């Protein structure tokens, strides 16, 4: 079953990247009491993700926060070391990286995709959502190959 607006996020373990190394976090605890702009990419360092998706949130971080967002987070089915390297290269301190190495979060959300044709295996779909105190208030799932409604610009219009 796919998550929808009004649903609580499932409680799974994610790995938050930090300069000091990976830190395990429970999603229920992490999203509690905050308004978070969360977006998912099929993979760190992949073309659209690196050229458009992450940079858009880096560029619009201050605007998102000025509209009441407490934190901006990116998730992908990658290990935390890849996510940290990607953040170091293309991200910023304004974006929290949440590694979903085993696709537990993507599966629990019902938002996986099969990237086997590209040698990627199971991945998370491209999407964005606004999560307020653990509840999904906006959900923007892209059609395969598309990039528009999960962008930071689109999310700004929802706040």
Image (cartoon, rainbow, N blue to C red):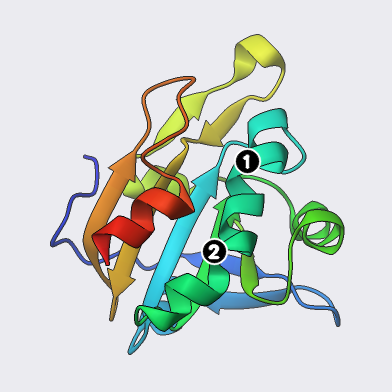
* Quadrant showing the C terminus: bottom left
Q: Foreground residue, 98 or 88?
A: 88
Q: Please tell me how crowded label 2 is: few (under 14), some (14-19), or many (20+) other residues with Cα within 10 Å.
A: some
Q: Foreground residue, 60 or 31?
A: 60
Residue 47 x, y percent position in the rendering: 72, 30
| Depicted 129 relative to depicted 112: above or below | below
Residue 155 x, y percent position in the rendering: 36, 56
Mark positioned earlier in the residue sequence (2 or 1): 1
From the viewer's perspective, is 88 left or right of 16? right
Residue position marked by numbered label 1 in the rendering? 52
What is the secondary structure assignment of the residue under circle 1? helix
Please say whether residue 102 is visible from this viewpoint: no
Q: Which residue is drawn at 18% across and 50% down?
A: 4
Residue 62 x, y percent position in the rendering: 54, 76
From the viewer's perspective, is 99 left or right of 10? right
Q: Residue 14 carries which label?
A: none
* Residue at the outermost bottom position: 33
Q: Which residue is drawn at 66% across and 52% down?
A: 55
Residue position marked by numbered label 2 in the rendering? 60
Q: Please tell me how crowded label 1 is: few (under 14), some (14-19), or many (20+) other residues with Cα within 10 Å.
A: some
Q: Quadrant of residue 60?
A: bottom right
């Amino acid at each position: 079953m796919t998550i929808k607006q009004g649903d609580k996020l499932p409680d799974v373990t994610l790995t938050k990247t930090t300069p000091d190394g990976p830190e395990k976090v429970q999603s229920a605890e992490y999203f509690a009491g905050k308004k978070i702009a969360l977006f998912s990419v099929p993979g760190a360092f992949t073309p659209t993700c690196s050229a458009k998706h992450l940079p858009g949130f880096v560029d619009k971080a201050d605007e998102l926060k000025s509209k009441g967002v407490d934190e901006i987070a990116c998730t992908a089915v990658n290990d935390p070391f890849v996510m940290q390297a990607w953040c170091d290269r293309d991200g910023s301190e304004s974006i929290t990286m949440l590694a979903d190495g085993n696709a537990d979060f993507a599966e629990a959300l019902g938002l996986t995709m099969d990237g086997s044709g590209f040698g990627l295996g199971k991945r998370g779909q491209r999407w964005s959502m606004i999560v307020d105190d653990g509840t999904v208030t906006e959900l923007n799932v892209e059609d395969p190959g598309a990039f528009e409604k999960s962008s930071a610009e689109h999310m700004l219009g929802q706040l």
